[in-house]
Image: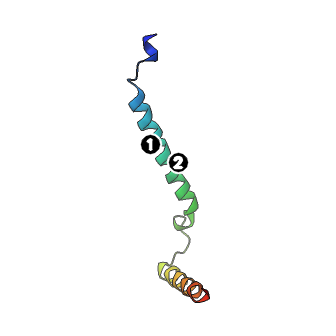
Amino acid sequence: MKFLNDESGQGAAEYLLLFAGVIVIAIGALMIYSSYFTGQPFDSAADADATRTHTAANDRSL
């Protein structure tokens, strides 16, 4: 019954779970932001202007 108290592999398992969690989060982020990586036309200046306009419109409505 010594194997019940053996914790020698616990650290490795915790690192493996942590690494798997990071991978899942990274894949989720890639799926959410896939339009930025697919070769579709991306104009950061136009996106920034649209964000500023939308934010300014929301500020005025408050």
The vertical placement of 26 against 43, above or below, is above
Q: Residue furthest right?
A: 61
The residue under label 1 is which amino acid type? Phe
The residue under label 2 is which amino acid type? Val
* Residue 2, quarter of picture: top left
* Residue 6, quarter of picture: top left
In the picture, measured across the screen, residue 19 lies left or right of residue 40, that is left
Q: Are marks 2 and 1 in contact (CB under 8 Å)?
A: no
Q: Secondary structure at mark 1?
A: helix
Location of residue 15 in the rendering, given as x and y in whole percent from the top left corner: 41, 37
Task: Say which mark, if any, is on residue 19.
Answer: 1
Task: Say which mark, if any, is on residue 45.
Answer: none
Location of residue 56 in the rendering, given as x and y in whole percent from the top left corner: 54, 87
Tell me which label, 2 or 1, sits earlier in the chain: 1
Location of residue 45 in the rendering, given as x and y in whole percent from the top left corner: 47, 82
Q: Residue furthest front?
A: 62
Location of residue 29 in the rendering, given as x and y in whole percent from the top left corner: 53, 58
Q: Secondary structure at mark 2?
A: helix
Residue at image position (47%, 48%) is 22
Task: Say which mark, if any, is on residue 24.
Answer: 2
The vertical placement of 8 against 11, above or below, is above
The vertical placement of 8 against 25, above or below, is above
